[in-house]
Image (spheres, helix red, strand yellow):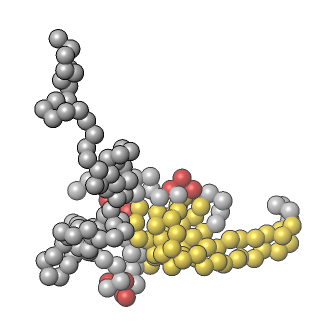
Amino acid sequence: MPSGKGSKLLRYVEHRLRITLMDSRTITGTFLAFDKHLNLVLSDTEEFRTLRRGSRVNVIEERQEKRNLGLIILRGENVVSIAVEGPPPPSAAGRLAPGGPGIAVGAGRGAMPVAGNGAAPMGLGGAPVAGVGGVGANAMAPPGMGRGMPPMGGPPGMGRGMPPPGAY
């Protein structure tokens, strides 16, 4: 088993982590995922900031401010340290989907609804449906080439690419 940073972090998926950022904020949340840049995905996240009143040398008052953030992505560049705060909560077992290979299911614009009786979806059947598809047959025809008009051209027997009669 490889012993890179990725495999070490995988042990702590679903654990509660305390993360210290470059600007001295502390983030606490449930660790869900990470990527090659060590960006972290956390859920049920809380941010803790220490606010000081007075000068840097002579601190008059110090208080800690807490904010609930929910689901966040932390940029790996800002992370200074990661500490495990606790094991995964017991209710997390049924909450998250298991990892590994799954089933490919179309989603979004490309997915077509499947008709239950084996017929083609609406608009793809044999008969045209009004409003589905491109422009009408006559819309793109050159002038004089609409339905009901005889085709324009020379006498019968003269095909395309042939010289006009009497050219020899």
Where on the picture, by quarter, is residue 35? bottom left
At a point 32% along the width and 83% down the height, the residue shown is 93
In the displayed structure, does residue 41 sit left or right of residue 69?
left
Does residue 105 appear in the picture of this structure? no
Q: Nearer the viewer, residue 41 or 14?
A: 41
Question: Which residue corresponds to the image point at 86% horizontal and 62% vertical from the top-left?
Answer: 55
Q: Residue at x 84, y 70 (%)?
A: 53
Quadrant (top left/top right/bottom left/bottom right) for the N terminus: bottom left
Up/down of 167 relative to 127, above or below: above
Front residue of 38/56: it is 38
**Rendering quarter of residue 19:** bottom right
- Asked if 109 appears above or below 168 in the picture, the reply is below
> Residue 101, located in which quarter of the rendered image?
bottom left
Q: How many marks?
A: 0
Q: Position of residue 126 (x, y in %)?
A: 18, 69
What residue occupies the far top of the structure in this picture?
168
Residues 14 and 69: in front is: 69
* Left or right of 147 in this view: 68: right
Q: Nearer the viewer, residue 3 or 33?
A: 33
Across and down, in percent, residue 98 comes to 27, 75
- In percent of width and height, residue 80 lies at 55, 57
